[in-house]
Structure formats: structure tokens, C-alpha cells
Image: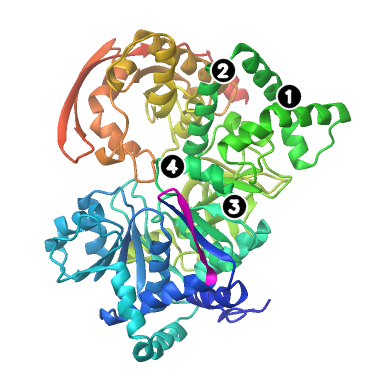
Amino acid sequence: MTQTSEGVNGLTSVPALLQRNATEFADKAAYREKELGIWQNWTWSETADEIDALSLGLLTLGINEGDFVAIIGRNRPYLYWAMVAVQSVGAVPVPLYSDASAEEMAYVLDHCGARFVIAADQEQVDKVRDVQEGLSQFEKMIYLDPRGLRKYDHANLHQFSKVQDAGRAALSELMPELNRRREALNYDSTCVMLYTSGTTGKPKGVVLSNRNIIETSRHSSEFDSLSAGEDILAYLPMAWVGDFIFSLGQAYWTGFCVNCPESVDTMMTDLREIGPTYYFAPPRVFETQLTTVMIRMEDASPMKKRMFDYFMAHAKKVGPDILDGNPVNGFDKLKYKLGDLLVYGPLKNTLGFSRVRIGYTAGEAIGPEIFDFYRSLGINLKQLYGQTEASVFITQQPDGQVRSDTVGVPSPGVELKIAENGEVFYRSEGTFVEYYKNAESTADTKDPEGWVATGDAGFIEEGTGHLRIIDRAKDVANMSDGALFAPKYVENKLKFYPNILEAVVFGAGRDRCTAFINIDLTAVGNWAERNNIAYASYQELAGHPRVLETIQEHVETVNKSVAEDPMLSGCQVHRFLVLHKQLDADDGELTRTQKVRRKIIGEKFEDLVNALYDGSPEIYTETEVTYEDGRKGMISATLEIRDAKVVPVTASKIAAE
């Protein structure tokens, strides 16, 4: 394999990888999509033909080199083709979150100056139409699904299939121009622009080059020996950098197959049918799946429940060692095989993990117990650490070195260093080019030598070289007595419980820690049904005395665990309340990738935070919410505030440590 400044083996762009795959893997499946209950299939050769037709169609519409093209919709082969077609004509794809509001889309469309939009369906078309008057550079929109759009003004509205038809009709005329534009692409050409989640402000446009994407895809694929034989399920947002690398970068580098589910509702069924060999999910997905398993076991017969508990206890004891190839005595191996026949195998099949060879989780820290649960089943689940600006990969966990308390060693080609204040820095060939139209933020994040500030606090273990992340650097602070405050550490422990969906811990500059809790409506609702407890809403269930008692038990158990860590023992939760609403991205409390916007939550619920610290036993509050149809409304509630037992930690003990 020859690597130069002009690419690897002369492959300088994603469209170049497509041309290679169309030759080397011509008849191999490149994409599958379930439609009306039937899996549709496209080979690499057919995929190249579809992308050529769309590329030529874009030329007929007057697309220019350097134009920005927004792509909006759920995971579908057609929209992945659209990204590569846009690249092929020298333009820049900008995928947007499909669940974003029209106003959120307006900011991105205006900021990048998109001339074209490729939208999945009427819902996305309508969002753009609602804000298009404020978009000075917007000209044309292409839609994929024609349902509901027949009576729209089609002066600047074009059907995806008809654009492809126009491209095929102009093949002889425009193919030379398409070839010229493809050949003009090089390693430093822009491959994609992805917008950050915007936890602290407006999203920033992260410019990633072909070098960034191809080198990252190459190194990460080689790290886990990914091949053309892999199958993945593409279900995470297309606007997220992880999906771009897994479903486009690595897929085009290795030639493996990308499978798209029919809908969000059928995702779990489709997952089981595909049985991916390579799988990624954020911790929330693994937590939800585990919650579903535990709910089902609560409803199982006593005999099945006893068998499940017995074999899972054994799996927890020896499963990870068997997975890592560590010595395990013959009797324990035999017992594990029996457990695999009776429990682990059927459970993996139910989850859709029977064929998973490599599984990853990232985005947030995953609870150790949840992580160990999946590995005990024989699922090779690993953690990685990354960000949009790195083209995902900063660290990965090598096989045989997988632990729940680290995020692994530097990915191939990545250098790490820790600043004096504990912040993690990296540099690699995956490091982003710049923040679009934001030279100041680019300079603040990436220095002239290419070192990028992650914004996370952590340290590298001596001996192992593994990176341990403590928390977001901006969230790590001190309490009024000087004790270290790391809220994410406590929040992750709380979220291990299936009853707790989200937690937000406060305490910076304060004399003690307090917390907001969101219950998991599925888990707690199931418990309520089994116990004949009637409820009419999330708010009513969240305020039920028995629910509050259960959450208090969880908080106090976590406090005991936190107290065992001398560095973070001051982060025990003294008081808490269960919020009357679920934190929601539509209300600005979470990002579109479901990350907590801590500062916004603290400001929005300032009255509740104050009540946690002034000793109030309860607090009346009114909150604006956004309904599913976009309407705004107000909800009110009187929330009970509870005190939680903490484990006393003496100052002398802390000092001694």
C-alpha cells in the first residue's frame, strides 16, 4: 500500500473510492434498505450508476464547484448517494439533523450559504419552505419521496428520480465535465461539512477534507481488521460525524455493506434481521436495550427468572475473560457454554447481536455495569473516544485491553498530550481543517502545530498508556471547600439504573451537590402497571411517592459508591428532585445528539436550583414546553425536594489521600 500526499494508492477522494469499489466489488452488496417489509439491494456497480446519474442531474441544474448542498432526512441509500454525488461534482455536502426545527435549519442553511437542498420528504421540504425567504443564497430543492408534494409549486422543486433521469439523458454531453470535476478532487479538497451539536452556543461548521476522512477510515478499519465482509446498520443521524465515518468513510474504504432500516419503529426488528457484524451505539441505546431486557425478565416466569439470574451471575464472573482469551478453568467454560445455549445465545439473538464481531460505544461515558453486562454475553463491546473535529477517532481499545474505566490508547496516527490544567489535546491526519467562517474559534481550538483542545479533562495511565476521561474540562470545578466537582462522574452512576433516564448534578462553587432526575417512562411505567398504579402522564408518575422513594434509594446507593473515591467523595448528592418534564432537544435542554446543555438547564430552571439549596421541602414551578406539532404551551407542577443520606468524609481523610 503506497501512501503519498496525493492519497493512498492514488485514491484521493471518496468518489475515487467509489470508482475502485465499482470495479473490485462490482457484484457485492453495497446498500440494503427495507421498504414495505422487503429488503432492497444495490451492488457497488449499481450504486456507482445511481450516483453517476444524480451527479449528472445536478450538473443539469447548474451546480457549481464549491457550492454547499444541504442533505436532510433519515438514513436512506439515496441520501448517502446524494452526499457522494455532491462530492463528485466538486460541491460540499452538509447533512442536517432531520429532527431539527425549521429555525435550527435556517441557521445552518444561512451560515453555509446552501444553494441546493436535498430533502427526504414533505416534512423536510416544508421546514425549508417555512424559512426560505430569509435564505439569500438558496435556489433549488430536490425531494426524494413525492407523497404530499404533487400540488406544490415545482418551479424550484425537483423530484430526485427525475433529476437522475435528466442526468442519464445528458450522459454523453456532460460526462466529460463530471470526469473533469472528479479528477480535480485531491486529498485536501473538502469532503464534508458537519455542524457541532452546540452544547454551549451556536453550532460550528467543521470542515473535513478527503485526507481527514480517508486517513481516519483507513487507520480505524485496519485497527479492527474491518473487511468487505462486514454488515452495519445505519440508523444514527446522518448529520453526526460517527455515522459519516462508519456508514460512508469506512464503508467506502473497505467496501462493506450499509443496511438502512425501514423506520425508527422497525429498527430493532431490522437489526435482528440483518445481524450486523460491526455495530455502534451511544450509551443511551445500550441502556435502553438493557432496560427492555430487565423489564421482560420481571414479567418472566419464576423458573426463567431464576435461570436468567443464575447464568448471568456466571457470565459476569467469567464471560469477559473468555472473550479476551484469558485463562478460565474447564468447568467454568463448560458452564458458560450451557449458559450460552440457554440464555446468552437467545438473548443476543433477541437484541440483534448474534453476529457482532466488533461493537463500539462513545459520545458519553457508559455505566461500568452496563458495559460489563454486554461483554459478559460474549459481545466484543469496546469504547472509543472522539469528536467531530477529529473525524471521530482519538482513542480506541485494542482487543484484550478492554476496560470500562478507560477509553483506550491513541488510535493509529494520533498523538496525545495532557496540558497542565488536565485538558486533553491531540493531533492527527484526521484533524479538521477549520471552523467555517470562524477563524477565531479555529485558532482557539487548534494551534499552529496542529494540536487540538478537546475540552475534556483526563490523564494517561502510566504503564498502560490508556486515556481516562474525568469530565468536560469546563464542567470540572471545585466546591466551596476546595473539593473536586465532576458532575458527569456522578450522573453516569445514576443513569446506570433503568429507572433513571437522565441526571443533571449541580455543585460548582457550592457547599454540597444536588441533582435533577428524569425518570425513564418505559421502565417506570412498566413497574407501575405491574403494581396496579394508575397514572395519566409523565408528570403524575414522576411525582408518585413510591417512585420518589425508589429514586432516593438509587441516589443513596450511588452516594456510597462515590464516597469510596477519595478524589471525588465530595460529589455525593445531598438533595434532589424529579423533574416534572423530560429534558428535550426541542426545548433546548439537550443537543440533537442528546447531550445535556448544562448551562441552559441551570438558567432555565434557576428557581428549582435555588430551592435545592435554600432548604425548601417543595417548589411550585411553571415551564414552557414544545409539543410534537411545534406548538408552545405551559405546564406547572409542585415538586417535592428530598434529602438523601450521604457518607461522611472527613477533611483529614481527604488530605491523607
Residue denoted by label 3: 395
Say whether disc 4 or disc 1 marks the residue closer to the N-terminus: 4
Say whether residue 65 is visible.
no
Query: Between residues 428 and 341, which one lies in front from this camera angle?
Result: 341
Label 1 vs label 3, nearer the camera: 1
Q: CA gap, disc 2 to disc 1?
A: 20 Å
Label 3 vs label 4, nearer the camera: 4
Query: Between residues 451 and 630, which one lies in front from this camera angle?
Result: 630
Seen at 37% across and 54% down, the residue is 196
User: Circle 3: is it few (<14), some (14-19), or many (20+) Cα within 10 Å?
Assistant: many
Residue denoted by label 4: 266
- Mark number displayed over residue 314: 1
Q: Amino acid at mark 4?
A: Thr
Seen at 31% across and 19% down, the residue is 612
Q: Amino acid at mark 2?
A: Ala
Q: CA gap, disc 2 to disc 4?
A: 24 Å
Say whether disc 2 or disc 4 marks the residue closer to the N-terminus: 4
In the rendered view, does 541 fall on the left or right side of 557? left
- In the displayed structure, 143 sits above or below 14; it is above
Residue denoted by label 2: 300
Q: Are dots 1 and 3 in contact, CB under 8 Å?
A: no
Say whether disc 2 or disc 3 marks the residue closer to the N-terminus: 2
Label 2 vs label 3, nearer the camera: 2
Q: Residue 302: image x %, image y %?
A: 61, 12
Q: Are dots 3 and 4 in contact, CB under 8 Å?
A: no
Residue 159: which quarter of the image? bottom left
Label 2 vs label 1, nearer the camera: 2
